[in-house]
Structure formats: C-alpha cells, structure tokens
Image: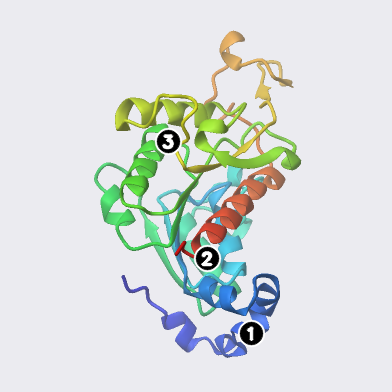
C-alpha cells in the first residue's frame, strides 16, 4: 500500500533529518534496530484516550508509516484523556488532527488517516494491508474480538488494550497474554467472545498468544450522589452512559498507549528464529 509522503517532500523541516530527530532512539535500540523501526508500518485502530497517545508515541519513536482508523470527532469531553484534544481542534475529525500532529512531530512519516470504523464491512479492507503491527484501542467487544481473530488467522502482530477508564494508578498497568488479565471486565468479555465466536481455546491453561495491556487496579464507578466507589452502578441505579460513564485521566490512558507501542515495536523488531 502506498501512503502519500507529499508533506515530507514539501516541508523544509523534513531536511533536519532522521538522525537529528531520532538519534536518541538509535542510542536506545542500536543503529540496526532503529533503522528497522524506520521501516515499520503500524496501524492504530481507535484514536481516542489510548489510541491517540499510542499514535503519538509511534511518531516520536520514528516509525516510518502509521495508519489511523477512527470516525469520531474531537469533543470537549475528550480533553481529559486524549493527546489531540485541544480547544482549537473541537469538532474536527480525530484522525485528521492526529495525522497533522504526527506530521509536525515526524515530517518523514507516511501517515494515512482513515475516517471510518472497523465493522464487518471494513475489517478485511483495512487490516489486509501488510502492517508490521496493529494496536487495538477500541471499546467494542464485538469488533475487538473480530480484529484479534482476523490478525491471528493472518499472522498479523496485534496488541489489544483493556479498559483504562475508572483507573487512577498508572503504575498498575501491565502487559500479559489476554487469557491472564485481572480486574478487567472488557478483556474478560473479549475472551468470552473469542471462545464462543471464533473457537479460541476454552481451556483456561491455554494462552491465546495475544498481548493485552490492562490494569491490576480495581475500577472505580461514578455513583448517583456524585461520589465514586468500587460498587458497580447497576446496583445503585446508575448506568454507564456517555454522561455518567467511567472517569478517566490522561496519565493512565497514555500509559496504556505507551505500553502497547513498546510491545508492538518489541515484537516487530525481534529477530526471526532461524
């Protein structure tokens, strides 16, 4: 797949060069691995509280090509947790704003914003593009499971993310096989969906071999009286709709995104076994 690099060709700042911007990455991973990172093409599905930070981290690590998939716009309620959510960008498409931000960070990056959602209709169209890795940062149980199943069937590296909402402790974030997460209702439901709809192993001792970013922290829920507690709202008459859903903070959602990027890069640059 070709991604337009017109911005890189026309922007005089692109002449600053890769070494000036990403020499620190080379000194961290080594020259050969840094060059490999520059060749990677990573897809971020869902450019919100987790995905926006993942996309930014990919750009700041010098990843050569990034595809962004989301159909939402930036709203005031995104400011607390999304890297691209600024007053000047309200009501604009998230993928467009994020792509502009990426090009400003990394002018040589080939970035493609796709304003759409992953659905039954679009799943294969958007995931069959030869990515070196996919980061799943959406909330839909149905389509998280569909993406994971598709990537596993087609040997595409994927890192999925659990629920970052309701958590306040970034030091509790972990990465483990999807079958080994704790205190994460979203990951649990995705596991169930994979077993029921896609034939993933039901034996709890068998791993899915899909990495998941999650938190060990028990989530807190908003209560009708304005307080928060670990009590689920279903027992107190409060539903988790858009107005009264999980609270969230950038220092946790960003940690999820950063952990996903670290893992997908690690997998992508790992030498193949001989």
Residue topped by disc 1:
19
The image shows residue 190, relative to residue 78, as above or below, that is above
Q: Nearer the viewer, mark 3 or mark 2?
A: 2
Q: Residue at x 59, y 9 (%)?
A: 235
62 and 220: which is toward the camera: 62
Kindly tell me whether residue 242 is visible in this rendering: no
The answer, for residue 239, to whether it is visible in the render is: yes
Query: What percent of the width, then of the height, locates residue 192?
Result: 42, 25
Dot 1 surroundings within 10 Å: few (below 14), some, or many (20 or more)?
Answer: few
Residue 105 position within the rendered picture, expressed as x and y whole percent measured from the top left = 60, 73
Q: Residues within 10 Å of mark 2 (few under 14, many from 20)?
A: some
Q: Which residue is mark 2?
A: 269
Q: CA distance from mark 1 to mark 3?
A: 39 Å
Observer-nearest of 82 and 170: 170
Is 61 placed left or right of 142 in the picture?
right
Are the residues tagged 1 and 3 within 8 Å (C-beta)? no
Disc 3 crowd rating (10 Å Cα; few below 14, some 14-19, many 20+) is: few
* Distance (Cα) linking label 3 and label 2: 29 Å
- In this rendering, the answer to whether 155 lies above or below 61 is above
* Residue toward you, 64 or 97: 64
Q: CA distance from mark 1 to mark 2?
A: 19 Å
User: As displayed, is residue 256 above or below residue 162?
Assistant: below
Q: Pointer 3: what residue?
A: 140
């Amino acid at each position: 797949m070709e991604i337009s690099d017109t911005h890189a060709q026309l922007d005089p700042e692109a002449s600053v060069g890769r070494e000036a911007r990403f020499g620190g990455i080379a000194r961290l991973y080594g020259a050969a691995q840094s060059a490999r990172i520059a060749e990677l093409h990573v897809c971020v599905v869902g450019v919100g509280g987790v995905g926006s930070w993942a996309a930014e981290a990919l750009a700041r690590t010098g990843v050569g090509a990034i595809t962004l998939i989301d159909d939402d716009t930036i709203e005031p309620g995104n400011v607390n947790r999304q890297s691209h959510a600024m007053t000047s960008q309200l009501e604009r498409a998230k993928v467009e704003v994020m792509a502009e931000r990426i090009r400003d960070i990394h002018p040589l990056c080939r970035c493609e914003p796709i304003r759409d959602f992953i659905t039954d209709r679009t799943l294969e169209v958007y995931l069959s593009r030869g990515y070196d890795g996919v980061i799943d940062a959406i909330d839909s149980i149905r389509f998280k499971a569909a993406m994971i199943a598709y990537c596993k069937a087609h040997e595409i590296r994927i890192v999925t993310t659990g629920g970052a909402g309701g958590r306040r402790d970034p030091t509790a974030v972990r990465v483990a096989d999807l079958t080994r997460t704790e205190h994460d209702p979203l990951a649990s439901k995705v596991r169930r969906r994979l077993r029921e709809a896609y034939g993933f192993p039901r034996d709890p001792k068998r791993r899915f071999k899909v990495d998941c970013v999650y938190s060990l922290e028990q989530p807190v829920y908003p209560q009708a009286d304005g307080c928060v507690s670990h009590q689920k709202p279903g027992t107190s008459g409060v539903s988790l709709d858009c107005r009264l859903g999980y609270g969230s903070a950038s220092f946790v959602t960003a940690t999820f995104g950063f952990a996903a990027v670290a893992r997908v890069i690690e997998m992508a640059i790992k030498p193949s076994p001989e």
